[in-house]
């Protein structure tokens, strides 16, 4: 074979090998199993311009694939169209289904929203109820029972009707009566403690009231009474509370009025008895004035009258056992303070003042018994021997103990002197009243005091009492004197008993210096007496002519008996004549009084 032939054959073989190589490369590229970089590099590295041929092969391959795809599409075109049509239908149905699902969700959400709104509304109704009930529990824990009752009323009248359909509301409603009973029991327990406390401390309360240093509000906390009264009023059971309070206080009154068996032995026993009673009634008086209806004036008056009868009976019984006059006197003082204290609180105490007269008699009786025993002991122990005195100082000591002066007589004289001055002052008082009323002395309505006759009557009564007392004293001296009535002859000196009597009378008559009757005899003021007799302004208005006549006649007889030589002395004769003249005039006054009577 020629070289040209060989070259041509070689070229054909080479071309066939190249085509096969490109086919392999395309197969590798389509397989995606080998790295594409190495495959493509082999295309570009083999021969120059080999990539162009490769591109031609690649284009031819693409055209073949396009034809296959076109054939395949032509074969499946109707199916594809039908599938697209079905898909469009499915999309429409899907959209419809989606709308249906969304609608159901919306409906469900709306229902949930409505339910939530309803729950919120119901909670808004229930929350105030729960808050008020919680407030009620707090008030109960804090012992603010009156406020708790008010909260219960609000719950029943305002809040419970709004939520009555709920179970929890029914439970609350059922629990309220129990709470009310608990409050009643607690408040009643506080009241019982209060009553027990004032029963134990009634003597302290009464002692303070009798001293008038503090008020009962300063000593006693009355809040349990007020609180219990308010609670029972709110519960509509005020009558039950009032009845219980009054019943318990009456029981306490009976206990207070029951004295201890040994009360009469000491003044402290009487004092405790009185202070307990005062403490009881001071508390009742306070309750009367600060509450309405718990106690009434009629109730306290009834209680006081019952107590007063019991007190008087107790004092009469226990004072009768008392033998100590000092204790009786202290009892009298306690009764006065007791009566004065309760009278200040408006309780009538006249019966207690009447009882004082009985206590006075009891005092006199016990005092008489005491001193009767003292004198009996003195008389039994005395040997009736004279008292030896060696000095003037000893004499003064002894005479200071002997009753030369009588206080009763001195008091009577002082009454006479006082009434005399008061009688004289009446004239000036009449003038003063006339001046301030501008009423002339000549008019019918001129002011006249009735004190003139009153003072004169008092002075006259005092003078009569002086006469009686003086006679009694003289009789006592004579009875005590131990005279020797069988003496055969005088011993040249006066009896010591008579000297004592003369000293006593001398001291008494020194006190009588301002008496009108005495002035008649000492100053010899008979001319004034006879001239002014019967006049309202007479100085000796209350000197009875009978009394004056009796005394003058005794003086005249005594002068005649004691001095037989008086008729020979001119002064004595003149005095006797003057006495006789006054006696005659007095007799005419006495006779005139008898005829007038």
Image (cartoon, grey):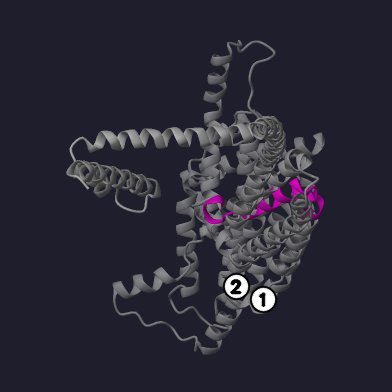
Dot 2 surroundings within 10 Å: few (below 14), some, or many (20 or more)? Answer: some
For this view, does 224 lie left or right of residue 572? right
For this view, does 41 lie left or right of residue 358? left
Give whichever of 596, 344 is nearer the camera.
Answer: 344
The secondary structure that most of the magenta stretch takes on is: helix
Counting residues from the start of the chain, the first of labels 2 and 1 encountered is 1
Give whichever of 263, 499 is nearer the camera.
Answer: 263
Q: State which quarter of the image contains the C terminus.
A: top right
For label 1, the SS is: loop
- At 65% from the left edge and 63% from the top edge, which residue is drawn? 360
- Is residue 228 a member of the stretch shown in magenta? yes
- Is residue 123 a member of the stretch shown in magenta? no
Per the model, the C-alpha gap separating discs 2 and 1 is 8 Å
Q: In which quarter of the image is residue 391?
A: bottom left
The image shows residue 501, relative to residue 1, as above or below, that is below
Residue pointed to by mark 1: 260
Residue interval drawn in magenta: 217-242
Residue pointed to by mark 2: 269
For label 2, the SS is: helix
């Amino acid at each position: 074979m020629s070289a040209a032939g060989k070259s041509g054959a070689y070229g054909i073989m080479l071309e066939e090998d190249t085509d096969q190589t490109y086919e392999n490369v395309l197969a590798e590229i389509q397989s995606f199993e080998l790295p594409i970089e190495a495959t493509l590099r082999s295309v570009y590295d083999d021969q120059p311009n080999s990539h162009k041929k490769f591109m031609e092969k690649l284009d031819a391959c693409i055209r073949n694939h396009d034809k296959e795809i076109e054939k395949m599409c032509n074969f499946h075109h109707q199916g594809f169209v039908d599938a697209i049509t079905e898909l469009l239908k499915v999309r429409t149905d899907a959209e419809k289904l989606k709308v249906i699902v969304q609608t159901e969700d919306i409906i469900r959400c709306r229902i949930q929203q409505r339910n939530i709104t309803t729950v919120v509304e119901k909670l808004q109704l229930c929350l105030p109820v729960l808050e008020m009930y919680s407030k009620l529990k707090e008030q109960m824990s804090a012992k603010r029972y009156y406020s708790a009752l008010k909260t219960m009323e609000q719950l029943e009248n305002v809040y419970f009707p709004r939520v009555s359909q709920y179970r929890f509301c029914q439970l609350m409603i059922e629990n309220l009566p129990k709470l009310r009973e608990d409050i009643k029991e607690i408040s009643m327990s506080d009241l019982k403690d209060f009553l027990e406390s004032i029963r134990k401390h009634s003597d302290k309360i009464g002692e303070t009231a009798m001293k008038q240093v503090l008020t009962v509000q300063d000593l006693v906390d009355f809040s349990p009474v007020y609180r219990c009264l308010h609670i029972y009023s709110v519960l509509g059971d005020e009558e039950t509370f009032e009845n219980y309070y009054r019943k318990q206080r009456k029981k306490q009154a009976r206990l207070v009025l029951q004295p201890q068996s040994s009360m009469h032995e000491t003044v402290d026993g009487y004092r405790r008895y009185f202070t307990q009673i005062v403490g009881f009634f001071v508390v009742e008086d306070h309750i009367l004035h600060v509450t309405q209806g718990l106690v009434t004036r009629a109730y306290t008056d009834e209680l006081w009258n019952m107590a007063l009868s019991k007190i008087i009976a107790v004092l009469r019984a226990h004072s009768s056992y008392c033998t100590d006059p000092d204790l009786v006197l202290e009892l009298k003082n306690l009764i006065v303070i007791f009566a004065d204290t309760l009278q200040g609180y408006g309780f009538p105490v006249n019966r207690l003042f009447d009882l004082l007269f009985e206590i006075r008699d009891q005092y006199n009786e016990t005092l008489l018994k005491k001193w009767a025993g003292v004198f009996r002991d003195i008389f039994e122990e005395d040997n009736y021997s004279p008292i030896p005195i060696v000095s003037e100082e000893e004499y003064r000591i002894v005479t200071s103990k002997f009753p030369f002066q009588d206080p009763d007589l001195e008091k009577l004289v002082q009454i006479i002197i006082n009434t005399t001055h008061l009688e004289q002052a009446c004239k000036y008082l009449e003038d003063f009243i006339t001046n301030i009323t501008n009423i002339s002395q000549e008019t019918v309505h001129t002011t006249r005091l009735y004190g003139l006759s009153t003072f004169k009557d008092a002075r006259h009564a005092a003078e009569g009492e002086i006469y009686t007392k003086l006679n009694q004293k003289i009789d006592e001296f004579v009875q005590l004197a131990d005279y020797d009535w069988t003496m055969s002859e005088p011993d040249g000196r006066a009896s010591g008993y008579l000297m004592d009597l003369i000293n006593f009378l001398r001291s008494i008559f020194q006190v009588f210096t301002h008496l009108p009757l005495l002035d008649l005899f000492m100053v010899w003021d008979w001319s004034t007496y006879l001239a002014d007799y019967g006049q309202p302004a007479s100085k000796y208005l209350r000197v009875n002519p009978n009394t004056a006549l009796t005394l003058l006649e005794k003086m005249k007889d005594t002068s005649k008996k004691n001095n037989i030589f008086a008729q020979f002395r001119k002064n004595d004769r003149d005095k006797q004549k003057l006495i006789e003249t006054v006696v005659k005039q007095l007799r005419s006054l006495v006779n005139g009084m008898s005829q007038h009577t």
